[in-house]
Image (cartoon, rainbow, N blue to C red):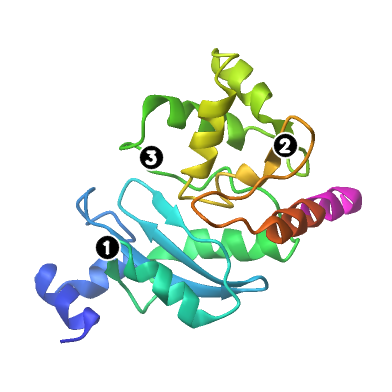
Amino acid sequence: MTVGKQLEITFGGKLQDVLSNGLKKMRPDNLYNTKFETSFGWIALEKNARGVTRCSLPEKQESKCMEEIKGWDSKHLKTTDLFSKEIEKLRGYLEGKNYSLQDISLDVSTAPRFYKTAWAICRSIGVGRTKPYKWVAEKSGSPKASRAVGQAMANNKITLIIPCHRVIGANGNLTGFGKGKTRLDLKLELLELEKEYISKH
């Protein structure tokens, strides 16, 4: 049975209404994912009615992107209609046409309270700028929590939208994305992209 047919059954044959009205008819706990291509490679997104719950790092090979999705507890959609706003924003960002991803809604409701705080502070860091873990800790009201900030960034499942590439080590060095995904080259590319955008505007 195709995903489309399953959705038709799930929504009582009103698949078109769901696609045209975005996530309005979805229950908040219904999770869906899709994949799309960008100038940096293939990215996978996951969301529910409240907002984005996952955003993968770009992969040059579509197959690697699909491998990432297989580990997610959500239904895969071949159509990208439900993700049109997020895809447009992310593609524009990676093409250097815009940098604002602030208006993309997120759902981090299941995360620890400190993680939520650290991620919100991370999103407040200006485009093309970097701040050390200690700065984020101080902003959170827990100046000695640099290690906890590092854990929050390492557990960030919504990369790019929560720009953990802007949070760096105390010595000014870039650190990996965490969970075995170092990708320092990608962090550097993203920062250079942002700085180039700033220089033109």
How many C-alpha atoms fall within 10 Å of the one at disc 2: few (<14), some, or many (≥20)?
some
Q: Quadrant of residue 25?
A: bottom left
Residue pictured at 54% horizontal, 44% vertical: 103
Residue pictured at 70% horizontal, 55% vertical: 184
Q: Is residue 195 magenta?
A: yes
Q: Report if residue 80 is visible in the image.
A: no
How many C-alpha atoms fall within 10 Å of the one at disc 1: few (<14), some, or many (≥20)?
some
Could you tell me the amino acid type at mark 2? Answer: Gly
Q: Position of residue 36 (x, y in %)?
A: 50, 74
Q: Position of residue 136 (x, y in %)?
A: 62, 25
Q: Is residue 12 left or right of residue 142?
A: left
| Of pointers 1 and 3, the one earlier in the residue sequence | 1
Could you tell me the amino acid type at mark 3? Answer: Val
- Real-space Cα separation, disc 1 to disc 3, in angstroms: 16 Å
Q: Quadrant of residue 192?
A: bottom right
Mark sitting on residue 126:
2
Main SS, magenta region, reads: helix
Could you tell me the amino acid type at mark 1? Answer: Ser
Mark sitting on residue 139:
none
Pointer 1 residue: 74
Pointer 3 residue: 108
Q: Report if residue 115 is visible in the image.
A: yes
Q: Is residue 103 left or right of residue 165?
A: left
